[in-house]
Image: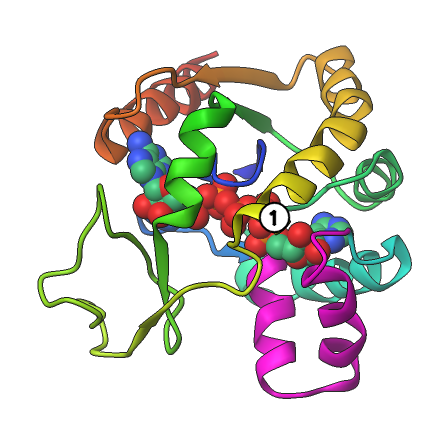
Amino acid sequence: MKIIFLGPPGSGKGTYASRLSPILNVPHISTGDILRENVKRETELGRTASEYMEKGKLVPDKIIISMIKERISQEDCRNGFILDGFPRTINQAKELDRITEIDAVINLAVPEDIIIKRLTARRVCEKCGAIYNILTLKPKEEGICDRCGGRLIQRKDDTEEVIKKRLEVYKETAKPIIEFYENKKKLYDIEINQADASVEEGVERILKVLKSLNEQ
Ligand code: AP5
């Protein structure tokens, strides 16, 4: 299955994609993670991208599109993939459409106040990228990743100021992408309105949508 997770920052794209990837047996491809890995390794791409990421702005389409083309042409994507954080502009959506056909677009909607609470409390493993939350998804040992023992850190763009900018960018760019997939009848909305909604509940709801597609 070729699946896209759309949704504002903090809507749970990475959390759900990382849970569903082993269940569906397809790779979880996060453009944000690929960019952060390049920033960490101080590659040319990383140096260019960090200028945009730290301000909460989108990295230029040209860079992102060639990055994703290269990634989805790899062998492990033969049976499908989950895209998290791509497409982010209508241009990216159209380019993707030229390369491959998508089966489902899961459109996550979460109220803004919940998003800000979630993101300021998010911690990620600097080694394996696993996502935690100091309010709702704590590691067994404070500051340490359950999965690999790596150190948990706060993302540079998870300050309130940058989160607000990222939300603003999302509002400016999301509508045409949503309409694009709505017109193709590929869009499935998942709304989460309670602050204490569990990750498992979200995963179940998404799986139900995907199962119904397989039965069609
Ligand atoms: P990216 O890394 O894609 O960030 P984002 O879209 O802003 O999304 P986040 O990773 O912040 O949130 P998420 O929806 O994955 O939420 P999460 O699962 O972590 O992009 C970063 C930057 O890279 C961009 O600003 C841009 O500069 C650049 N970039 C990336 N892709 C690009 C592209 N295609 N084009 C141009 N530029 C691009 O969950 C959030 C928190 O909520 C976690 O702590 C989680 O534990 C918690 N949580 C609490 N309850 C729940 C629940 N019920 N379900 C899920 N999570 C929950």
Residue occupied by mark 1? 161
Q: Quadrant of residue 93?
A: top right
Q: Quadrant of residue 88?
A: top right
Image height of 101 relative to 104, above or below: below
Q: Is residue 123 visible?
A: yes
| Left or right: 110 in relation to 199 | right
Q: Position of residue 126 (x, y in %)?
A: 40, 75
Read off the magenta span. 30-57
Name the one closer to the observer, 144 or 37: 144
Q: Is residue 17 visible?
A: no
Q: Main structural element of the magenta stretch: helix, strand or loop?
A: helix
Please tell me which residue is depicted at 48% across the width and 11% down the height of the picture: 216
Name the one closer to the observer, 115 or 206: 115
The way the protein has been coloured in the rendering is rainbow
User: Is residue 125 within the magenta segment?
Assistant: no
| Element on which disc 1 rests | helix
Q: Amino acid at mark 1?
A: Glu
Dot 1: within a 10 Å radius of its alpha carbon, few (fewer than 14), some, or many (20 or more) residues?
A: few
Q: Position of residue 57 (x, y in %)?
A: 76, 52
